[in-house]
Image (spheres, rainbow, N blue to C red):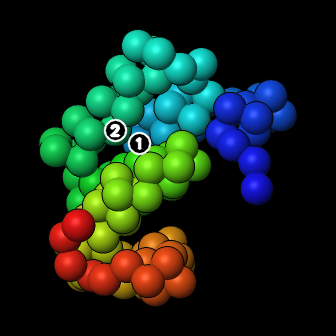
Amino acid sequence: VGSLKEARRFKLTVGQDRRPVMRAVQRLFLSEGGTEEEERRRQLIDIIERGDKGSKFYASMYLSLYHESMGDTTEAKKWMVQAVQTDYAQVSGTRDPMVELAKVAIQKRGWSGRKA
């Protein structure tokens, strides 16, 4: 098992994603740490607080994966549970395979569906 820091050395160069939430996710995962990384994390939290239903789900899910890659399971659990509790995951995104992925992640990690 590697780390996010280690994985960043092998980053892929891709074009600009048309979805703002995915651009924010990419910037967070590719940031170099310090205040830049904290600012990128804060941008995802802003999307969670102000974005559309789908963006709230995706920002929460990827923020969970980010925290898990940093070894912070408490924050990882908090954000993944929040992702599956979004309106998107509960109603409009029920056929989205990424919603199912988030539910499986919670199940496999032994996290409950309740807030952390």
Asked which secondary structure carries label 2, the reply is: helix
Q: Quadrant of the C terminus?
A: bottom left
Number of numbered discs overlaid on the protein picture: 2
Residue at x 41% of width, y 42% of height: 21
Quadrant housing residue 90: bottom left
Residue 75 at what x, y percent from top left? Answer: 34, 53
Residue at x 43% of width, y 58% of height: 73
Residue at x 37% of width, y 32% of height: 41
Q: Which residue is mark 1?
A: 21
The alpha-carbon separation of the residues under discs 1 and 2 comes to 7 Å
Asked which secondary structure carries label 1, the reply is: helix
Do the residues under discs 1 and 2 have CB atoms within 8 angstroms? yes
Residue at x 36% of width, y 64% of height: 77
Question: Looking at the picture, which amino acid does disc 2 mark?
Answer: Leu
Q: Quadrant of the N terminus?
A: bottom right
Q: Which residue is mark 2?
A: 44
With 7 as the anchor, is 38 left or right in this view? left
Quadrant housing residue 85: bottom left
Question: Looking at the picture, which amino acid does disc 1 mark?
Answer: Val
Residue 43 at what x, y percent from top left? Answer: 32, 30
Please indicate, yes or no, whether residue 111 appears anywhere in the rendered image. yes
Q: Which of these two is toward me, 33 or 91?
A: 33
Q: Is residue 65 above or below residue 108?
A: above
Q: State the mark number for residue 105.
A: none
